[in-house]
Amino acid sequence: MRIADAAYAAEDIIESHIVDKIHLTRSKTAKIGSFFSCSRGPKDPTTLYHDVQNVIEEMDRIEKVAIETNAEKAVVLRDQRLRFVSSSTRKKSSVMMVFSDHVLHGIMEKLVAHEPRRQVIPITGMGGIGKTALAQTLYSKQVMKEHFDICAWATISEQHNTREILCELVSQATKKNKKQLSERSEEEIGLELYQYLWGKRFLIVMDDMWYIESWNEIQHFFPNNDNCSRIMVTTRQSQLSSQLNNHYSHQMEFLDEASSWFLLSKIVFGEERVPLDLERVGKEIAYNCRGLPLSVVVVGGILKNMEYTQECWESIRNNLTSIVNLDNDKYCLRLLKTSYDQLPLYLKPCFLYMGVFEEDDAISISTLVKLWVYDGFLKPTDGKRLETIGKEYLKDLVNRNLVLVDELGSTGNIKVVKIHDLLRDLSVSQAKKEGFYHVVGESSPQGIYSQRRVVIHKNTSKEKVIDDLKSMSHARSIICQYGKVPQFRNHALLRTIHVYKLSHVNSLLFQYVNLRHFAIEVSSMSLVFSSFTQLWNLQSLIVSCPHKSIAPAKIWKMPHLRHIEMDERRLILPDPPGDAVILENLVVLKGVHNFNCDEEIVKRIPNIKKLGIQYSGSKGMRHDDYYSLSNIKCLGKLESLDISCEYDFRGNDCLYELTFPQTLKSLTLEMKGDFEWKKMLGKISSLPLLEKFDLWSGCFGTGKWENFEGQFPSLKYMGLFSCHSLNHWTAEASSIFPRLEKLRIVNLDGLENIPFEIGYIPTLQKIWMVDCGESVLKCAKEIVEEQMDLQGDDLPFHVQVWLPLNKIKEMQILTGPNFEVVIIPNEGYVF
């Protein structure tokens, strides 16, 4: 902490000098210097030198203490020698939980028993004992999906919010987007849930309930249909079980020694045999976890990232032995602290950052990694992008069982994560101890004056925000994912503003000349662009704005830019001026309208990885060579491309000559009018690295698409949307799409078939078919039946068909093993 304080002091001195100089220059130009909080001007060289020299002297003192401390602790460090192996040599294992058959069967009998009245099934036990895992195991079983008409899951948590719980249940039950419920009252949402559940047999899981009030506030929205509906509740509070059901509850038990060792060995070694020289100490470690599954999982995460030597394992065993007498959650938190202590230094701030998010938040990986990047946690290594390094760090935390995967993307990459309650508790307590960030409205052991990261949780009062922010002139990051943040002054050194709405952007933004990351919703981009060129260190600009906006030409003179994104593709980029620089750091450019991809622009963005662009306008507007799109092939590092075009293509052939860089991994194309796909699909299918492909609208002039062997060699996901002219989809060879995992077919009302060869793809996992015709649905059913005849009922892939209410009845007959027919809930649902 002394080292950090000295480093922060150096930052404050240098960055304050830069900011003051910029403000002074601007004030002279605009003649409004009196407005600035830093209008005193930059320090003179003598004062600046003196301040820096003081920091250097402090660092020298720290170094002297560190050398002495290192000498004293050398023996201890030599004894421990906890060496971590590289990620490339780590053994892979799948985390599993241990539940006996009689436990599973006992609860399943209660869930599916012919007891007409609505019943609550409580599962109780201490934190980390596996309540949620048991509920998930039961909830995901096929027999539950077949027995109940509706299944939905809501996490309650200690600080429960009845309205949010109801929104979650309605969203899952009806498949409505939560945004559709944003303007409705709690009672209205609850009434919709009640009406939707009425007459249906439902299974509701309410995970992590702390207080009976949570149940009392919501139970009347669950109708008693007398049709064997069930509500499964997990809770740490054993006294709640009798209030929920005075006849039955399941009390979780600790693992016995054999089960603990079985679970630990599977986490560390997977299916491989345990080395004999580690078995004895391994069993001792498993025993010292005292039967708590979470403890076993976390310790397993530590062990599998260490060298498999007795010396290393004995070090862990000795550390655990010293804390086995602590009770329940205190013991578990102390045990989890061991996993934090064993983290490499570069991962510790990344783990502490998880406490910024609220309990049970679903955390977007793209957002999380951006915040890590712009807070300076990630350092470039081996020529890798910082975002790539951040994703590697995240995978490391997942492998150590400190972060949980909540959702995977279409190609299998981690998309959303969560953090277990106890692990979040550890993150929060350790962050508070180290002064890592300050949560507005909470006390801080170090006080709030020098805090550098500010977290504003939802429902924080405006008064608390104003009161805390006015005392934090050294803040570098303000993170608020909910609501509107009041205006704040005296924050000229801010590097990160990640908020939903910030009031008075027009009068305040030009103060924040030190910004690196700016993510915000505004009514007009002019509020941002008016002072844009003063942001000398800006690296990331992510803006939600309802209107098209023209960026200032000086955007081409900002060499630090890494990420530019504007929703709904409303950003218009001017041509680069003659003195423009090469934006070597720019890797993401999304939301650009009528992007002119001429040679000059291509030279300015040589390292672009992700590009999202839209073209629109009436015929006769500038679209010679369609904005030079043929130069796309010159972007030699492009991995993700999204093009949406609303032009009429009749009589314009230049786009048919469009070729793509061989580096592409993700491609989304949306074309209007009479754009003929057949002329382009041959080139797309030969892209060697393409893993994700979405095709929207356009035209198949002959009504046919034929696939050949060798096409799409790396494709994992494909989506076909609203290609109404496609009638016949065939394959010439028996082997097509060799790596395809997921196929999505949406609104192809004219399609009559899909190739039978798709059923033979060994990697196939799922096919979604949304609002398609009867012929292609029956074809998909025949593919499933054919594969079941060959492979048995337990197919590796599953077909899910979504149909509107007026079609569902006649197609419901197709429902069967590995083939599911469900109702499209509403027009706003995103597939």
Image (cartoon, rainbow, N blue to C red):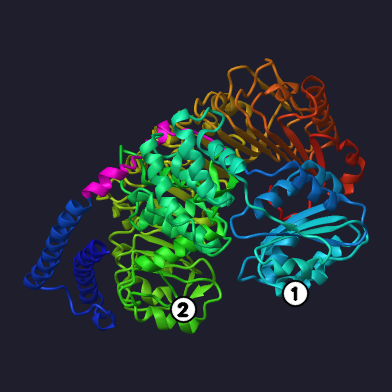
564 is higher (above) or lower (below) than 57: above
Kindly identify which numbered label has been placed on residue 217: 1
Taking the image as shown, residue 317 lies to the left or right of residue 242, namely left
- The stretch in magenta equals 74-95
Residue of label 2:
441
Q: Nearer the viewer, residue 696 or 817?
A: 817
443 is higher (above) or lower (below) than 248: below
528 is higher (above) or lower (below) than 659: below
Q: Residue at x 84, y 53 (%)?
A: 110
Q: Amino acid at mark 2?
A: Gly
Residue 676 placement (x, y as % from top left)? 63, 31
Residue 178 placement (x, y as % from top left)? 68, 62
Total numbered badges shown on the rendered structure: 2
Residue 716 visible in the current orientation: yes
Taking the image as shown, residue 487 lies to the left or right of residue 458, namely left
Judged from the image, the secondary structure of the residue bearing numbered disc 1 is: helix
**Of all residues shown, which one is farthest toward the top?**
733
Q: Residue at x 81, y 69 (%)?
A: 221
Taking the image as shown, residue 36 lies to the left or right of residue 159, namely left
**Chain-order first, disc 2 or disc 1:** 1
